[in-house]
Amino acid sequence: MPVPPVLARGLKAPIIVSPMFLASGPDLVVETCRSGLIGTFPALNQRTTEGYEAWLDEIAARLAGQDAAAFGVNLIVHRTNARLEADLKATVKHKVPLVITSLGAVQEVVDAVHSYGGLVFHDVISRRHAEKAAEAGVDGIIAVCAGAGGHAGALSPFALVPEIREVFSGPIILSGAMSTGAHVAAARLIGADFAYLGTRFLATKEALCQAEHKGMIVGANAKDILYTPAISGVNANFLIPSIVRNGLDPENLPTHARLDMASEAKVWRDVWSAGQGVGSIHDVPPAAELCARLIGEYNAARAALAAE
């Protein structure tokens, strides 16, 4: 499927660097966009709407006049996000090219972004959620499959991507355990239009997470990832060594109350997330270096497939 024109300019590979809670900031977004990948960040990574707007101004100024890829923001569409209305107004004011919505597909949010020509991509973990997102008029659907960092689903991409395609004709973005350009090429082969990479970019110089978190990712393998609702109230993948570091027993975690965005920052600050693709991550490079590597790997994988 052709890349939407809003996202085509400056794009060198079909990769969206996902918005990582407490980890994505202006430096990471700017460096990935300059390098030809779509950079994003969560609005809630700033403590106030005013701070969020300041980041939008900074990113726009630093990318102005450059042949850079588009950037996007993540809005949490959940009843416990008290900032949604104000952040949405700021998003519309600044005409953010791409808005990624999570935990709720709401027609009014989609309409607000469409009012200035922006695109809305929405996170889903099931066909039912994809159907609701399509009904709300989203422009793209992110299939958050097994092994993704953060809040994740449990379905294989081989199951979820084709089911989404049956009910949605727009771009499909695949999330889940991808860390190399070859993984991106594989995502394209099974029917995704973009790959959505998060954990690989946690382990970059520009990511705002702690150095110990980055080192834990580099030293981990898939066996070190636990999928559980016990940390934040919604199923997510976490680093087992991080759970232990906080004095918790991974085999006997206390029951967590329902998701509440007011307390999420403390949860994710203390217990660190990562996806099952950590076994393919062996360094903490500058974001621009990693982007160049991924683009090269992606093109090499495509060439190798064409030569067969």
Image (cartoon, grey):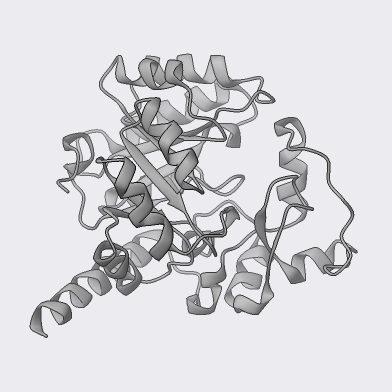
**Residue sitting at x 23%, y 71%:** 296
Residue 25 placed where, x, y %?
Answer: 50, 43
Looking at the image, can residue 167 be seen?
yes
Residue 146 placed where, x, y %?
Answer: 53, 62
From the viewer's side, name the closer residue of 53 and 273.
273
The quarter of the picture where residue 240 lies is: bottom right
In this rendering, is residue 98 above or below 230?
above
> Is 280 left, or right, of 259 in this rendering?
left
Quarter of the rendering occupied by the C terminus: bottom left
**Residue sitting at x 56%, y 25%:** 51
**Residue sitting at x 65%, y 25%:** 81
> Is 154 left, or right, of 64 in this rendering?
right
Residue 13 placed where, x, y %?
Answer: 23, 58
Picture mark count: 0
In this rendering, is residue 131 above or below 221?
above
From the viewer's side, name the closer residue of 195 and 83.
195
Q: Residue placed farthest to the left in the image?
A: 307
**Residue sitting at x 32%, y 64%:** 187
Looking at the image, can residue 220 be seen?
no
Residue 209 placed where, x, y %?
Answer: 62, 54
In this rendering, is residue 159 above or below 66?
below
From the viewer's side, name the closer residue of 199 and 189.
189
